[in-house]
Every structure is written in structure tokens, then in C-alpha cells.
């Protein structure tokens, strides 16, 4: 089972960035937590970050045939990107939307997501644990697909 974790803009600054909102854990530390849980569940992980919208689109397109599930924290592009939405819809790989913060409890512009409707589900509001929960959700998605 292969999982592709994609992280959007400014998530490279985790640990420094608005710690009252996003905590002090760095993205590298979150990646380590993801790899640990994935190892326990016999899943392989690729984990990437970019500040460039088009790069996320390209990585989603290239995932075809290579990954079972995409886990996406699109960060600010969640609220702006029709291109990401279209890439997820075109690809057909189950995609899980994640956020560290509970976007529904924040500013109105964060309460709209362009990608939720084309994702299998969303995990938000648990800080770094959102990522670990996504590993478990991804395994569930793959097992459910196999049992059909
Ligand atoms: C975020 C929430 C987004 O609204 C914001 O733009 C981010 C991080 C989160 O993980 O809570 O950059 O995706």
C-alpha cells in the first residue's frame, strides 16, 4: 500500500508559523510521526511539500498507477484552487483532505473548500494528529475498496 502525502504553501514554516494556531511541531517532525504509524500498518509513504500550486497539480497527475491514496493538506490553495479540484477529480485516486486547524471554526474564507467535494473525506482540527489519523483513514479506504 502506497500513500502520497502532499503539503501546500507555508507548511514548510510549521514550528515557526503562527504557533498559537499551528503549534510548535515542524513538518519534518510530522513526517516522522506519519512514517512511524505507516510502518506499523505496513504502508509506504512519500511525503512532499511545495509552495507552488502547479507543482501540486503535477504531483497529483503523476500519482496515477503509483499510489493507492493521496493525503492532501492543500493549505491556502484549499480555499482558492479550482485547478487542484479538477486534478483530483480527473485522477480518480481516493484523496483525503486534511488540515491541522479546524477550518470550519475560523474565518469565513477558510470555511469554503474547493476540494472537499472531490475527496473521500476530511480530517481537520487535530493538529499533527490529523496527519496520523489520515494514515489510518487511508488504510481503511484501501481495505474497503479491496473488499468490494
Ligand atoms: C491549513 C488551513 C488553511 O486555511 C491555511 O491556509 C493553512 C493551513 C491547516 O492545516 O490548518 O495554510 O491547511
Image (tube, rainbow, N blue to C red):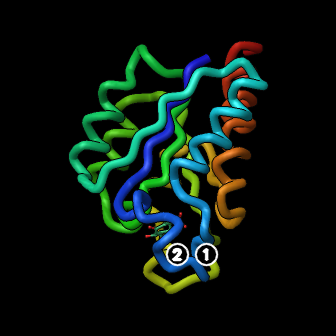
Q: Earlier in the sequence, mark 1 or mark 2?
A: 1
From the image, which quarter does the N terminus lie in? top right
User: Is residue 4 rendered to the left or right of residue 24?
Assistant: left
Q: Residue 113: x, y in percent?
A: 47, 64
Q: Is residue 114 visible?
A: no
> At 70% across and 13% down in the image, what residue appears?
146
> At 52% across and 75% down in the image, what residue appears?
111
How far apart, in angstroms, are the residues tagged by discs 1 and 2? 5 Å
User: Is residue 68 rendered to the left or right of residue 127?
Assistant: left
Q: How many marks overall?
A: 2
Q: Is residue 111 visible?
A: yes
> At 42% across and 55% down in the image, what residue appears?
74
Q: Quadrant of residue 2?
A: top right
Residue denoted by label 1: 104
Farthest residue toward the bottom? 107
SS for dot 1: helix
Q: Are marks 1 and 2 in contact (CB under 8 Å)?
A: yes
Q: Residue 60: x, y in percent?
A: 35, 34
Residue denoted by label 2: 111
The local crowd at label 1, few if under 14, some if 14 to 19, many if 20 or more residues have their Cα within 10 Å, is some
User: Is residue 11 rendered to the left or right of residue 133?
Assistant: left
> At 31% across and 44% down in the image, what residue appears?
56
Amino acid at each position: 500500500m502506497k500513500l502520497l502525502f502532499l503539503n501546500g504553501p507555508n507548511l514548510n514554516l510549521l514550528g515557526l508559523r503562527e504557533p498559537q494556531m499551528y503549534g510548535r511541531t515542524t513538518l519534518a517532525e510530522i513526517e516522522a510521526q506519519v512514517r512511524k504509524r505507516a510502518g506499523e500498518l505496513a504502508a509506504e509513504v512519500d511525503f512532499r511539500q511545495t509552495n507552488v500550486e502547479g507543482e501540486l497539480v503535477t504531483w497529483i497527475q503523476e500519482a496515477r498507477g503509483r499510489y493507492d491514496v493521496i493525503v492532501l493538506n492543500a493549505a491556502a490553495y484549499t480555499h482558492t484552487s479550482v485547478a487542484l479540484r479538477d486534478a483530483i477529480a480527473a485522477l480518480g485516486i481516493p484523496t483525503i483532505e486534511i488540515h491541522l486547524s479546524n477550518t470550519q471554526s475560523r474565518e469565513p474564507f477558510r470555511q469554503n473548500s474547493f476540494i472537499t467535494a472531490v475527496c473521500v473525506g476530511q480530517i481537520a482540527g487535530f493538529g499533527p494528529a490529523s496527519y496520523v489519523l489520515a494514515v489510518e483513514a487511508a488504510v481503511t479506504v484501501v481495505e474497503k475498496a479491496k473488499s468490494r
